[in-house]
Image: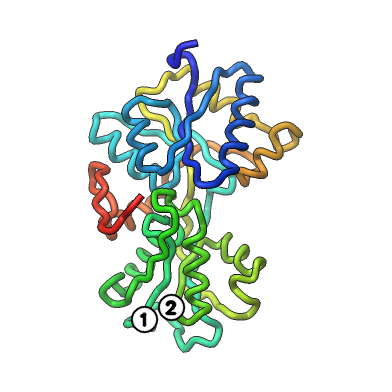
């Protein structure tokens, strides 16, 4: 069968479980009559560029990859569309934590201090919280020092090792504050990275959304229509797909939306991560 008749998805291999997830979903889609295959990329930057080059039709994109895909597509005279996302991708927030015994009571008190963040390309543990601090009067890298914890660049923070290292920096006293997504705050507390009673929340960002399935205006409507239909009708009660949905961290697929990417758009521009045409402009970004 030619590739023109197969829906090919691009995903980033940020963890070994990604193979298990997409082998399982591949079998599901083929059983339901949708010719389907997938390709894995080492990082989101290659993936976004490959989709624009026509190597596959639908991308499982991080929120930062969505921003770049949208900008590259627009520069090429195309449009990008976020067609679906997980229930757990919606209405997330990031937290800025300090030690429980810290004298810091407000964002203004971070002036002159060290703030530990995740990887430079992490929306949840770097870009969005740094933008939040900026909006509250302190310029990152000017009014306070940023301590990045880059682990597996190009994964856009999907590998949470950098976020966890930033949390450890706070506990060890190498930073006055740290940033993380609210879900990892709970995870790090359960696993003991953040000992009970050792931290408190200094600030919380506005809500934002995370990953989405991205298609370009060049994508065949028939294949995408069937993919979208199967996704939104996928049931957590189906014993064949439930383990895959657990691995991917969702109970239900939802229709895509883009209004909650605005905070990340602002952060990308403030930190000069991509330019308006989607070119990478961040200094010291390695992937």
Which of the two residues, 249 or 232, is positioned nearer the viewer here?
A: 249
The residue to which callout 1 is attached is 113
Which residue is pictured at 45% across the width and 12% down the height?
2
Kindly indicate the quadrant of the structure image that contains residue 107: bottom left
Give the number of callouts. 2
Which residue is pictured at 51% across the width and 61% down the height?
181
Q: Is residue 62 left or right of residue 183?
A: left
Residues at circles 1 and 2 in contact by the CB criterion of under 8 Å: yes
Q: Residues within 10 Å of mark 2 (few under 14, many from 20)?
A: many
Which residue is pictured at 73% across the width and 31% down the height?
240
Measured along the vertical axis of the image, is residue 194 above or below residue 90? below
Q: Secondary structure at mark 2?
A: loop
Q: Secondary structure at mark 1?
A: loop
Measured along the vertical axis of the image, is residue 198 above or below residue 240? below
> Between disc 1 and disc 2, whose residue precedes?
1
Question: How far apart are labels 1 and 2 at the CA level?
Answer: 7 Å
Kindly indicate the quadrant of the structure image that contains residue 26: top right
Measured along the vertical axis of the image, is residue 158 above or below residue 110? above
Measuring from the top left, give residue 33's x and y in whole percent: 61, 16
Q: Which mark is residue 175?
A: 2
Q: Is residue 143 left or right of residue 206?
A: left
Kindly indicate the quadrant of the structure image that contains residue 149: bottom left
Measuring from the top left, give residue 78's x and y in whole percent: 29, 29
């Amino acid at each position: 069968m030619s590739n023109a008749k197969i829906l090919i998805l691009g995903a980033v291999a940020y963890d070994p479980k990604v193979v298990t997830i997409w082998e399982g979903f591949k079998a599901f889609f083929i059983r339901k009559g949708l010719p389907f295959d997938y390709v894995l990329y080492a990082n989101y930057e290659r993936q976004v560029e490959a989709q624009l080059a026509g190597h596959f039709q639908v991308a499982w994109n991080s929120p930062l990859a969505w921003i770049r895909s949208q900008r590259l597509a627009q520069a090429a005279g195309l449009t990008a569309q976020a067609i679906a996302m997980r229930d757990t991708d919606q209405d997330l927030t990031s937290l800025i934590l300090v030690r429980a015994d810290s004298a810091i009571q407000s964002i203004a008190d971070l002036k002159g201090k060290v703030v530990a963040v995740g990887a430079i390309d992490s929306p949840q543990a770097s870009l969005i919280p740094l933008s939040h601090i900026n909006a509250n009067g302190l310029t990152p890298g000017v009014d306070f020092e940023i301590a990045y914890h880059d682990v597996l660049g190009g994964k856009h923070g999907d590998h949470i090792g950098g976020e966890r290292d930033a949390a450890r920096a706070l506990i060890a006293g190498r930073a006055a504050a740290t940033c993380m997504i609210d879900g990892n705050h709970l995870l790090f507390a359960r696993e003991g990275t953040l000992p009970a009673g050792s931290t408190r929340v200094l600030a919380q960002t506005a809500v934002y959304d995370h990953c989405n399935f991205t298609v370009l205006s060049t994508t065949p409507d028939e294949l995408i229509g069937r993919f979208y239909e199967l996704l939104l009708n996928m049931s957590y009660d189906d014993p064949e797909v439930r383990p895959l949905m657990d691995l991917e961290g969702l109970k239900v697929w939802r229709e895509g939306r883009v209004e909650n990417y605005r905070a990340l758009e602002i952060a990308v521009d403030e930190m000069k991560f991509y330019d308006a045409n989607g070119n990478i402009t961040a200094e010291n970004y390695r992937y």
